[in-house]
C-alpha cells in the first residue's frame, strides 16, 4: 500500500512539474519571431514599438528637411536611423535584410536667422515612424504588415502605442513613389550608395 501511495505522490509531482514546464514554454513562445535587436521592436502579434536605444545603438541613415509651405526654412526635420548591420547588408547586395529596423524621428522645426543664413533646426519631437523588414510574411492577419514591411507611426507622447491602424491607408501612400526601391527613398541616403 505504501508503494502505491509513494507512486501516486511521485506521479502527482511529475504532473505538476510537467504543467509548470508547459506553462513556462507557452509564455516563452509568446516572444517575437525575430531575434536580436529586432526582437525588442516586434512582439509575437506583430505590434511594433519604438526602440529605446535607437539613438545610441543604431546607425544614422540620413535626414530630410521638409520645406515650409510659405516663407523660408523647413517645417519639419526627419532624422532616420537603421538597426546595426542594415547599412552594410544593403551596400553588399542592394536589399534590406530581413529584420532590418528603420526609425524616423520627425521634429517640428524652429527657423531663425543666423550668420550662415536662414536656418531651421530640430524643435519639438512630433513622433516616430518605425518600419521592420519582413521578407517572410510573419503577420498575415495584422493590418500593419504587408508589402515586405511592418509599418507604424507613434506620437511623441507614447512610443509604445502606434496610432496607425492599417498600413495601406495610414502609411503606404507616402511611400508609393519609392515602390521600386522597396518602399524606401534610398536615393536620399548617401550611405547606401554602393
Image: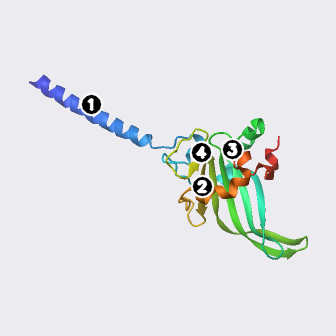
Characterize the local packing of mark 3: few (<14), some (14-19) or many (20 or more) Cα atoms within 10 angstroms. some
- Count up the numbered dots: 4
Residue 162 at x, y = what percent? 55, 59
For marks 4 and 3, the one nearer the N-term is: 4
Within the image, what quadrant is residue 15 found in?
top left
Residue at x-position 74% and y-position 43%: 87
Q: Is residue 91 visible?
A: yes
Residue at x-position 24% and y-position 33%: 13
Instruction: Give the side of residue 22 with respect to residue 84, left or right.
Output: left
Residue 37 at x, y = what percent? 61, 44
Q: Are marks 4 and 2 in contact (CB under 8 Å)?
A: no
Which residue corresponds to mark 3? 84
Characterize the local packing of mark 1: few (<14), some (14-19) or many (20 or more) Cα atoms within 10 angstroms. few
Which residue corresponds to mark 4? 38
Mark 2 lies on a secondary structure that is helix
Q: CA distance from mark 2 to mark 1?
A: 51 Å
Residue at x-position 67% and y-position 49%: 57
For marks 4 and 1, the one nearer the N-term is: 1
Mark 4 lies on a secondary structure that is helix
Q: CA distance from mark 4 to mark 1?
A: 37 Å
For marks 3 and 1, the one nearer the N-term is: 1
Mark 3 lies on a secondary structure that is loop
Which residue corresponds to mark 2? 168
**In which quadrant of the rendered image does the N terminus lie?**
top left
Residue at x-position 55% and y-position 56%: 166
Q: CA distance from mark 3 to mark 1?
A: 44 Å
Residue 86 or 67: which is nearer the viewer?
A: 67
For marks 2 and 1, the one nearer the N-term is: 1
Which label is found at residue 14? 1
Q: Nearer the observer, disc 2 or disc 3?
A: 2
Amino acid at each position: 500500500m505504501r508503494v502505491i501511495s509513494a507512486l501516486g505522490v511521485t506521479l502527482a509531482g511529475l504532473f505538476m512539474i510537467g504543467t509548470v514546464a508547459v506553462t513556462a514554454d507557452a509564455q516563452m513562445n509568446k516572444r517575437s519571431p525575430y531575434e536580436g535587436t529586432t526582437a525588442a521592436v516586434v512582439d509575437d502579434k506583430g505590434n511594433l514599438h519604438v526602440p529605446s536605444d535607437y539613438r545610441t545603438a543604431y546607425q544614422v541613415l540620413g535626414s530630410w528637411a521638409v520645406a515650409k509651405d510659405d516663407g523660408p526654412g523647413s517645417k519639419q526635420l526627419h532624422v532616420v536611423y537603421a538597426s546595426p548591420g542594415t547599412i552594410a547588408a544593403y551596400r553588399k547586395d542592394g536589399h534590406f535584410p530581413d529584420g532590418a529596423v528603420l526609425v524616423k524621428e520627425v521634429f517640428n522645426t524652429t527657423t531663425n536667422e543666423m550668420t550662415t543664413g536662414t536656418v531651421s533646426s530640430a524643435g519639438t519631437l512630433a513622433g516616430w515612424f518605425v518600419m521592420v523588414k519582413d521578407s517572410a510574411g510573419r503577420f498575415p492577419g495584422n493590418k500593419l504588415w504587408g508589402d515586405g514591411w511592418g509599418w507604424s507611426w507613434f506620437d511623441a507622447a507614447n512610443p509604445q502605442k502606434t496610432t496607425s491602424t492599417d498600413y495601406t491607408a495610414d502609411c503606404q501612400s507616402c511611400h508609393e513613389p519609392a515602390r521600386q526601391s522597396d518602399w524606401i527613398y534610398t536615393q536620399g541616403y548617401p550611405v547606401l550608395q554602393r
